[in-house]
Image (cartoon, rainbow, N blue to C red):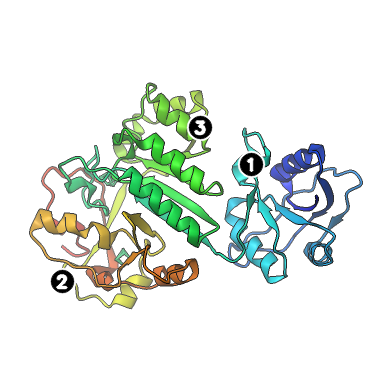
Amino acid sequence: MKVALYGKGILGEKVFRYLVSAEGIEVICICNDTLASEETAMVFADTIYDAGQVPIMDFAGLCDICNRGEADAVILATENGFLDFVVKRMVRHGLRNIAVIPSYYEEDYEIEDGSFIWVETDKPRMSYIEYHISFHCNLKCAGCTHFSNIIDEERFGDYEKFCNDLIRLQEFFWGISKIRLMGGEPLLNPELPKFIYAARSAFPDADIRVVSNGLMLRDHHTEILEAMRNTATFFDVSMYPPTRGSINNIYKICKDNGVKLTVTSDVEEFMARMNLQGDSDIAEAYKACPSSHCNYLYDGHISTCVMPQVIEIFNKKYGLDIQPGEQDVIDIYEDGLDGYKLMERLKSPMDICRYCDVQSRFYQWFVSSDPLPDEWSSKI
Ligand code: SF4
Ligand code: SF4
């Protein structure tokens, strides 16, 4: 098989070395693309390594070679954040046989034949989904936007349904850029490793994160740590004030177990932006919303953000009747749906956006022992 390689920097070189040593593969050119991404406003600046006699060419040259039928496939090795942009650009230029190598192979993961993902070019790539591994939480932050601080009983994601939903999403999308497994506190769910493996197996291209306040992580969580390491999943810690005292221990556990750790900057403030009157201008509230891209999946349903699928927790706690609109929550098993239609609908404001304000109220983070509905309100 003759392949053209689109890949610079450390990852590109690692893939190049793998390809030239693989039986039956000939690398016929390497693309040195310098175009800035219109979507990310970043420039592909990585350097090209010593590729011996293999010719280096620009993007137009790569397209010519492929369109003349001289390459059987293009291998794409670039940062996760650029993949969608580059694949779309290749497809626009008539390239079809495209295989992607996920960017986490830049690190300590060995490339094998099965590491390459063939892009189904008739499907889009989804940018983001989040999913509740646990609904409840060990930390009860006032104004938690997922209402995890007002759930008193244990409530977990359903593993079987999660797997089915991932299969359904595979029908729509060739990949997903980022998957956040969260809550609530995901470490409370003893089945967390199974969810991690399922997400990785369905979407090998994804940047997967276990989003946690970090307080419960212990050395003896060997299965969770192994699952994160084996699947190149990040442990993504939100630095709430109580987390600061544990961060050195979290860092040590992750380091000792080969788990990739990311930590947010110190969280001093939370933001309240609900309008409990429900009379906000929907379009304006949506336009001002920092969560409008946080597409939330649960039990066969997906919504622009988490709100329409968790508002029942708030209603139940306070005897309210805030209802999502009929179109706010999309049944992913609906007839006639495809990835493009789904993405279009998820880019739209929802009826329930009228319960969010355009203005936000910022307040010092605190744990609320007896939370009142006003704690979520943009105005007090
Ligand atoms: S730690 Fe996160 S999920 Fe838990 S209550 Fe606080 S904000 Fe909500
Ligand atoms: S309901 Fe609408 S405005 Fe409110 S957080 Fe969700 S997307 Fe944003």
Residue 66 in which image quadrant: bottom right
What type is the residue that disc 1 sits on? Gly
In the rendering, at what x and y percent does residue 192 appear?
36, 37
* Residue 5 in sight in this render: yes
Under circle 1, the secondary element is helix
Q: Name the residue under label 2.
A: 277
117 up-or-down from 283: above or below: above
State the CA–CA distance, disc 2 to disc 1: 53 Å
Q: Residue at x 62, y 32 (%)?
A: 108
Circle 3 Cα neighbour tier, 10 Å, few/some/many (<14 / 14–19 / ≥20): some
Q: Earlier in the sequence, mark 3 or mark 1?
A: 1
Q: Do the residues bearing badges 3 and 2 touch, measured as CB atoms within 8 Å?
A: no
Q: Mark 3 points at which residue?
A: 229
In the rendering, at what x and y percent does residue 126 appear?
50, 60
Residue placed farthest to the right in the image? 53
Q: Do the residues bearing badges 2 and 1 touch, measured as CB atoms within 8 Å?
A: no
Q: Quadrant holding ligand 2?
A: bottom left
